[in-house]
Image: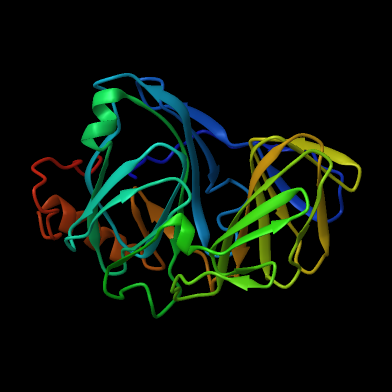
C-alpha cells in the first residue's frame, strides 16, 4: 500500500515489565470512507524491529455494495511488502506482471529490490456485494548488498503455511521459524512472522532465539509479568529474555522480528534505502515515468510534493 508519512509525535505506553523495552500505541488515521489505519512503525523511539520498518493495521471496515479499496499504482524500492488479511480480499497487480487475489491467512511477499510498482484493489465480485476488510501490511527493509536485487513476488495460500495447534492456541508460521517450525517462504535476511490466536487463560511462549522480537496485539488482552496490555499495541522486548504471555481475553496477535540490520534506513514515502541519494533517484524515476508500468492499469499515484 502507499501511505504518506505522519509528522505527528508518536507516544508509547508506560511499562513496568523489565523484559519490555517499549510499548507502542499505534496512531489511528482515517483514510476516507471510514477506512481506518493504525500505524505502529516507524516510531519516534524505534525505527525497526529486526528488519520490520513499517507496520500498518487497517480496518476493520465494512465496504458497502459498490465500494472498495483502490490503491492506484505506486512505486517501492529497497524493501519487501507483506500483506496479511484476516477478513476480505485484495487484488494485487504489479509491474512484473504478477496478478494475485490475496485471501485471509495467505502469505504475500512482494520484494521491491531495485524497483517495482503495484496496485491494490478490491476484486470486482467483492466490490459488487460489499465486504469487510481487516488486515496488516508490513515493510521489511532489505539488508546491505540486497537492496538492489531483482523484484519478485511470492504467494502461499493459507493451507500451504505451517499451522501449529496447541492446547488453547493456534499459530500460523507466515515467514521464518516459530515454535520449531519453518515457513516455506524464501527470504534474503533472517526474520519471522507468525499469527497466534488464543483462548482466554492460555500461556504462549515467545522464542528467545531471535535477536529482536515484538508482539503486535491485534485484539484481545494479555498479561506479562503481572502487567496487562490490550490491543492494539506493539510490545517490543529486550533480546535474550524468555517471554511467556498469558491471555486474559480471547486474543489475536502477531509474533515478529528478526536479526537487526547493519544500520538505519532512510524512509521517504514508499522508498526505503541506506542511501539518501538512492531515494532522490527513485523520486525522479517515478516522476519521469522510468519505473516499469503495471499492465492494464492507467492510473498512478503522483509523487508527493
x and y, in percent, of residue 164 in the image = 65, 60
Q: Quadrant of residue 226?
A: top right
Report which quarter residue 228 is drawn in. top right
Position of 81 relative to 148 (above/below): above
Q: Position of residue 102 (x, y in %)?
A: 35, 48
Image quarter (top left, top right, bottom left or bottom right) of the C terminus: top left
Residue nearest the viewer, comparing 91 with 275? 91
Q: Residue at x 82, y 65 (%)?
A: 241
Q: Is residue 286 left or right of residue 187?
A: left
Residue 57, given in percent of the width and then of the height, sits at 50, 39
The quadrant of the rendering that contains the N terminus is: top left
State left or right for residue 245 relative to residue 29. Answer: right
Does residue 151 appear left or right of residue 202 in this picture? left
Q: Nearer the viewer, residue 249 or 260?
A: 249
The residue lying at 50 percent from left, 63 percent from top is 161
Q: What is the residue that sits farthest to the right in this orientation?
A: 226
Q: Is residue 248 above or below residue 176?
A: above
Q: Residue furthest bottom?
A: 145
| Residue depicted at 56% across the width and 58% down the height | 48
268 on left or right of 199 = left
Amino acid at each position: 500500500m502507499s501511505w504518506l508519512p505522519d509528522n505527528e509525535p508518536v507516544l508509547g505506553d508506560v511499562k513496568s515489565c523489565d523484559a519490555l523495552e517499549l510499548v507502542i500505541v499505534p496512531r489511528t488515521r482515517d483514510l476516507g470512507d471510514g477506512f481506518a489505519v493504525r500505524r505502529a512503525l516507524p516510531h519516534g523511539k524505534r525505527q525497526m524491529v529486526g528488519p520490520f520498518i513499517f507496520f500498518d493495521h487497517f480496518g476493520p471496515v465494512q465496504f458497502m455494495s459498490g465500494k472498495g479499496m483502490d490503491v492506484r499504482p505506486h512505486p517501492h524500492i529497497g524493501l519487501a511488502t507483506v500483506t496479511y488479511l484476516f477478513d476480505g480480499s485484495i487484488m494485487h497487480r504489479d509491474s512484473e506482471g504478477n496478478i494475485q487475489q490475496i485471501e485471509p491467512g495467505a502469505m504475500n511477499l512482494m520484494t521491491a529490490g531495485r524497483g517495482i510498482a503495484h496496485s491494490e484493489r478490491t476484486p470486482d465480485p467483492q466490490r459488487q456485494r460489499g465486504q469487510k476488510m481487516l488486515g496488516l501490511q508490513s515493510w521489511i527493509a532489505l539488508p546491505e548488498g540486497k537492496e538492489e536485487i531483482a523484484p519478485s513476488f511470492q504467494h502461499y495460500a493459507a493451507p500451504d503455511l505451517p499451522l501449529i495447534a496447541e492446547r488453547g492456541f493456534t499459530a500460523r508460521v507466515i515467514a521464518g521459524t516459530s515454535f520449531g517450525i519453518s515457513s516455506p517462504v524464501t527470504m534474503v535476511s533472517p526474520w519471522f512472522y507468525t499469527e497466534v490466536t488464543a483462548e482466554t487463560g492460555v500461556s504462549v511462549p515467545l522464542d528467545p532465539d531471535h535477536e529482536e522480537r515484538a508482539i503486535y496485539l491485534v485484539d484481545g488482552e494479555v498479561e506479562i509479568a503481572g502487567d496487562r496490555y490490550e490491543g492494539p499495541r506493539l510490545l517490543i522486548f529486550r533480546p535474550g529474555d524468555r517471554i511467556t504471555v498469558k491471555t486474559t481475553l480471547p486474543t489475536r496477535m502477531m509474533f515478529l522480528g528478526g536479526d537487526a540490520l547493519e544500520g538505519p534506513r532512510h524512509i521517504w514515502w514508499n522508498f526505503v534505502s541506506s542511501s539518501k541519494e538512492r531515494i532522490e533517484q527513485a523520486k525522479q524515476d517515478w516522476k519521469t515515468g522510468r519505473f516499469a508500468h503495471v499492465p492494464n492499469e492507467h492510473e498512478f499515484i503522483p509523487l508527493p510534493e
